[in-house]
């Protein structure tokens, strides 16, 4: 079944989901579990949680926090309020405030949409000069308040980016956090295409504390960058949903955050698990690191092949079910 949640009125989408949930409940004798890898749909679930909870099971935060965590400005405000290190960030409302921020941080700086769901949002970009900045912000200045944030650029390569995947149980009793490090990405502001599981107690501790204090419940993926200038791990983004790289963080008994969530919501015993230190995960698009690179860090063929030693899981391909990989490959062939 295909359904356009963006084009359809939300009330129709809620009604469709409720009917689907009721059908599945009658068939299986229990409410189905509702999860998402989409930022927009995570906010949709939060916005209509009462209506959807009658027909589905899903983690419900103690308070409305999902939309705030996915908004780059509100996430920064939350981080500051809970003493979580983050890059210096501003949401300007005038040209003078833009000039003040540039004077404070200099170039390069990072530009991001504040609310990622509003129209005319600027693309996420590393801006290296005033002409680039002027061009980059023009979309975000079409509506009041301006829909972009300016962020301090933290120097360092992709290896300074640390990732966290966690599950925070429905009653706060079940909490698991896994940490890992980016090894490669196919664009300067893109998602990881090659990553490894690696223990980082500081990142894990910050994540436990931050998510617990804001009352978050469910699966979450969080990115940090290590700032060598002061030694802190600074918050980059919070994906208040299932992260696209959640299988990197499969535990020693193959438990990942989605399976932990399923066991918790379905009332089954949740066994303990430990991270697999050194476990490698690869997104198939990582081959573009050889063919071309927007980051200026092109990898040689031999170097790329050597780096694949020890990869334990691919994002799309699985021997027991090749259809997702086939669908992805067909999409990639026609991708611009």
Image (cartoon, grey):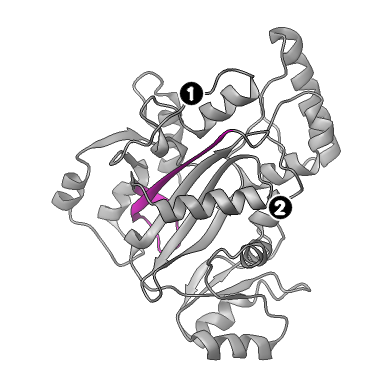
Image location of residue 158, percent across then percent down = 35, 61
Disc number placed over residue 333 in the picture, else none: none
Q: Which residue is mark 2?
A: 67
Image location of residue 259, percent across then percent down = 52, 26
313 in relation to 118, above or below: above
Q: Is residue 134 left or right of residue 191?
A: right
Image location of residue 306, percent across then percent down = 16, 46
Residue placed most toward the observer, 292 or 189: 189
Residue 251, image quadrant: top left
Q: Is residue 273 visible?
A: yes
Alpha-carbon span between mark 2 and mark 1: 31 Å
Q: Is residue 336 visible?
A: no
The majority secondary structure of the magenta stretch comes to strand
Q: Describe the element under mark 1 as helix, strand or loop.
A: loop
Query: Residue pushed farthest front?
Result: 173
Give me the residue at 80% from left, 21% from top: 19
**For the residues carrying marks 2 and 1, which lies nearer the camera in this image?**
1
Tag 1: Cα neighbours inside 10 Å, few (<14), some, or many (≥20)?
Answer: few
105 in relation to 158, above or below: below
Q: Is residue 117 left or right of residue 323?
A: right
180 in relation to 97, above or below: above
Check contact, mark 2 vs mark 1: CB within 8 A. no
25 in relation to 111, above or below: above
Task: Please say whether residue 188 is one of the residues in the magenta stretch.
Answer: yes
Task: Please say whether residue 176 is one of the residues in the magenta stretch.
Answer: yes
Q: Is residue 306 left or right of residue 336?
A: left
Q: Which residue is mark 1?
A: 271
The residue segment tinted magenta is 174-194
Residue 6, image quadrant: top right
């Amino acid at each position: 079944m295909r359904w356009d949640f963006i084009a359809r009125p939300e009330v129709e989408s809620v009604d469709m989901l409720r009917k689907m949930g009721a059908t599945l409940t009658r068939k299986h004798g229990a409410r189905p579990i509702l999860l998402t890898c989409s930022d927009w749909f995570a906010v949709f679930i939060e916005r209509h949680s009462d209506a959807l909870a009658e027909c589905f099971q899903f983690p419900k935060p103690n308070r409305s926090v999902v939309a705030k965590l996915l908004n780059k400005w509100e996430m920064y405000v939350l981080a500051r309020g809970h003493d979580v290190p983050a890059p210096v960030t501003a949401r300007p409302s005038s040209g003078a405030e833009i000039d003040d921020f540039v004077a404070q941080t200099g170039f390069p700086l990072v530009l991001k949409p504040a609310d990622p769901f509003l129209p005319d949002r600027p693309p996420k970009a590393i801006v290296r000069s005033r002409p680039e900045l002027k061009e980059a912000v023009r979309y975000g200045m079409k509506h009041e308040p301006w829909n972009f944030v300016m962020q301090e650029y933290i120097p360092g390569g992709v290896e300074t980016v640390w990732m966290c995947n966690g599950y925070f149980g429905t009653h706060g009793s079940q909490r698991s956090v896994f940490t890992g490090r980016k090894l490669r990405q196919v664009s300067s502001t893109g998602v990881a295409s090659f990553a490894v599981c690696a223990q980082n107690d500081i990142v894990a501790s910050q994540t436990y504390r931050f998510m617990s204090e804001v009352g978050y419940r469910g699966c979450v993926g969080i990115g940090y960058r290590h700032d060598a200038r002061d030694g802190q791990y600074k918050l980059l983004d919070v994906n208040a949903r299932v992260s696209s790289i959640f299988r990197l963080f499969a535990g020693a008994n193959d438990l990942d955050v989605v399976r932990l969530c399923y066991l918790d919501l379905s009332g089954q015993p949740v066994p303990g698990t430990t991270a697999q230190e050194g476990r490698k995960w690869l997104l198939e698009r990582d081959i573009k690191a050889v063919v071309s690179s927007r980051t200026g860090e092109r990898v040689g063929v031999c170097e790329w092949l050597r780096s694949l030693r020890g990869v334990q899981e691919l994002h799309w391909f699985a021997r027991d079910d090749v259809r997702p990989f086939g669908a992805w490959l067909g999409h990639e062939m026609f991708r611009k």
